Image (spheres, rainbow, N blue to C red):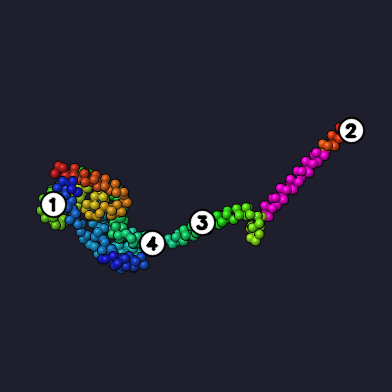
Amino acid sequence: MNTLPNTVEKLIEKLRDAKPVLNDPENVTGRIMQQIEHTPVQLKPRYLIWFRIASSSAAVFFLGLLLLQQTTDTTVASVPNQTFGIERQVTMDSISQRHRYCESSNMIKSYFCYLQEHSIKNNQLKALKQL
Amino acid sequence: MNQSNLYDLIEASKRQDGNAFRTIVEHYQSMVYSLAFRLLCNEEDAKDAVQETFVRVWMNLSRYDAGKKFSTWVYAIATHLCYDKLKFSKQHYGEISIDETVKGILSSENVEQQLINSELISLIVALTGTLTPKQKIVFTLRDLEELDMEEVIQITGMSAQKVKSNLYLARQAIRSKLNNY
């Protein structure tokens, strides 16, 4: 304001002091009241707030569950003796045991195959020697 | 009207109390009218803007943040409404020179002189007719309504830098307009 010339300052001062006068305030108020009579106050959309709370709680719950699952699975895998009691742990344990059984039976099977293969070869060698 | 009274009236209005809202309207309508008149330079448009502003205030009362000044919130609604009207208005004032009426107003020594609305319109149009809507709003809020910078920032939603630059440009335009006077 200080940089403005005196004329501008004077003019702005006049404008500032000369407040526009509302000639018929009652009429304007009446029109406003008439219009709002049929317009309800908009309430905050509460269902949105509840939805927001519910979805964020669910997200936190599932995240927690996931983390819990992850840590428990590690424990089960590292300490097989703790796999009794809780059903889920039993299931995990039985799966791993089954896997282990399969693995060992496969090993035995492959060993038998190996032996069988060698016995055939030995027999062939014997037959060759006899010739 | 003190803050606790106002708060009670707002709370009552939220519960659809028409009488409480009427008190709010009666208290704030001259403030809104002054701003709308200075921005729109038309009595009827200003009255319409007042009406529309208070209907919006009524409808959005639940969104009012009690931590902020109620007048600032009302000013913000009125300003945005007038901004839309100014932006889409087909009214172009062009280069209106400072005529004899304005010269007469200026030459008068009595600062308290009450200008009639038509004189006021010609004065405002002569000074701010060529300003952009943003410049006009910032100039009106800061220099005519005498609001502080923080309030102008809150009302317009502009950054401090933008408010300052718009105000500077508005003052420059007015000064250049008065150069020939």
Report which residue position mark 1 lands on: B105
Q: Which mark, by number, is residue A59?
A: 3
The kind of residue tagged 1 is Ile
The kind of residue tagged 2 is Gln
In the displayed image of the protein, which residue is found farthest to the top? A131
Q: Residue at x 26, y 66 (%)?
A: B1
Q: Tell me where residue B26 sits by quadrant.
A: bottom left
Element at badge 4?
loop
Does the image show residue B40? Answer: no
Using the image, name the chain to which the residue with label 2 belongs: A
Measure the C-alpha gap from mark 2 to mark 1.
139 Å
Element at badge 2?
helix
Crowding at dot 2, Cα within 10 Å, few <14 / some 14-19 / many 20+, comes out as few
Q: Which residues are magenta?
A: A94-119
Element at badge 3?
helix
Report which residue position mark 4 lands on: A42
Q: Residue at x 73, y 48 (%)?
A: A104
Instruction: Examine the structure image and report whether residue B52 is included in the region drawn in magenta.
Output: no
In the displayed image of the protein, which residue is found farthest to the right? A131
Q: Earlier in the sequence, mark 2 or mark 4?
A: 4
Percent x, y for residue B103? 13, 48
Measure the C-alpha gap from mark 3 to mark 2.
79 Å
Give the left or right position of residue B173, taking residue A118 as reference. Answer: left
Does the image show residue B19? Answer: yes
Instruction: Examine the structure image and report whether residue A106 is included in the region drawn in magenta.
Output: yes
Measure the C-alpha gap from mark 4 to mark 3.
30 Å
Using the image, name the chain to which the residue with label 3 belongs: A
- Tell us which disc is closer to us: 2 or 1: 2
Percent x, y for residue B163? 28, 48
